[in-house]
Amino acid sequence: MANQSNSAAEFYRQLALLLKSGMPLPESIRSLEPGLNSRAFREAVDGVSRSIDSGKKLSEAMRSFPNVFQKQYVEMIEVGEDSGTLAATMAEIGQTAYTDYKIVKLFRDILFYPVLVILLLIAVFIGMNYLVIYPSFKPLFDELFEGYYRSVVFDFSVVIHEYILFFVAGFLVLVAACIWFLSGKGKSTSILIMVVPLLPGFERIFKELLNARLCMFWSMLLKRKLPEKKIFPLLQLCIDNKAVQHDLKMIDQTVQNGTPVKEAMEKAPDIASTIKLTFRHVPEERIAEELEVLSQLYLEQAVAKLRTTAIAYEAALTVMASLAILLFILIMLAPLGNLIHTDDLI
């Protein structure tokens, strides 16, 4: 999954429209620059525009800004320039980049509710201990228990009361970190993409998204009539999964030795079986079209699973929050229950 901003996605899509309308490339880029929301992206586009005016190709100019323009997209743009299909290539890149952006945004939306609930629980816990439990229960507990074991929660409230500034500062740092993590700024998206697959239920979703990207880029390269010896190195740049990259490298080496692609793929364990079946049974002239359709199917399956997973996470977190509150109350009242039990025995 690429670290893709909405500014980049909109830039690719709008540039494709202007190129299809017949507007020259330099004028197209300059006309888009004022409407870009991101200052960093706007400055990068300005640099690209000036480089093109000095005679550089678009892909060459974009390589000067690797933090803004994804390497895989720049490579695809170069293919579009060399094949004379820059406008069509830009449109496909724009759609792929926009899909990446929407998926990452959906990840953030899914995590927003759990993060918010956890922060609220922490805030309530600190506030209840400092404002309610310590001042209200300390005199009572001191009188009843006279220094004996009282309550884990109450003892913790004493610590919070004594070091309240430390707890408040730590909580504010945690809030700031969560806001940054969900903001999409800096490296937060890259970290988000690394963290989310580690959560239960997301591994299969990422596999579906990976297959969707592989099919889409493969389709784009086949449409440009690239020779197979160029397709697989480019695909390795477009996919950020080491296992699939290894399989693509192995397929490339096997094809270089004269083996047909459909046979070379059979020994690639991390290439989806549906992709293998497509190459095995679909006529060669229709493979690019079928891969594009297959990409959409994988994407739809991933989005459906994402929404189901989001509902499951919200339900599980609601139950966990309720249990945490109940446990808090029980631990707090445990000493009183022990006292009542002792009085009954006496």
Image (spheres, rainbow, N blue to C red):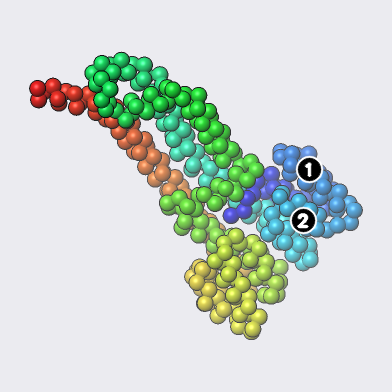
Which quarter of the picture shows residue 77?
bottom right
Judge from the rendering whether residue 34 lies leftward or rightward of residue 106; answer left or right.
right
- Could you tell me which quadrant the C terminus lies in? top left
- Judge the density around disc 1: few (<14), some (14-19), many (≥20) Cα neighbours within 10 Å: some
Q: Residue at x 68, y 59 (%)?
A: 72
Q: Is residue 304 visible?
A: no
State the image coordinates of residue 112 (x, y, percent, origin top left).
Answer: 50, 38
What label sits on residue 63 in the rendered view? 2
Secondary structure state at the residue bearing disc 1: helix
* Image label count: 2
At 57% across and 78% down in the image, what residue appears? 264
Lower sequence index among marks 1 and 2? 1
What amino acid type is highlighted by mark number 2? Answer: Arg
Q: Residue at x 79, y 66 (%)?
A: 82
- Residue 43 numbered mark, or none: 1
Q: Residue furthest left?
A: 346
Q: Residue 249's quadrant in the figure?
A: bottom right
Residue type highlighted by circle 1? Glu
* Relative depth, front residue between 195 and 61: 195
252 sits to left or right of 116: right
**Residue lying furthest right:** 54
Along the viewing direction, whichever of 273 and 69 lies nearer the viewer: 69
When asked about the image quadrant of residue 240, the answer is bottom right
Q: Residue furthest bottom?
A: 258
**Residue at 47% from the left image edge and 56% from the top image edge:** 203
Quadrant including the N terminus: bottom right
Find the distance from the CA under tag 1 to the CA under tag 2: 14 Å
Please provide percent x and percent y for residue 339: 19, 23
Mark 1–mark 2 CB contact (< 8 Å): no
| Disc 2 secondary structure class | loop
In the rendered image, residue 81, in percent from the top left (x then y), is placed at: 78, 62
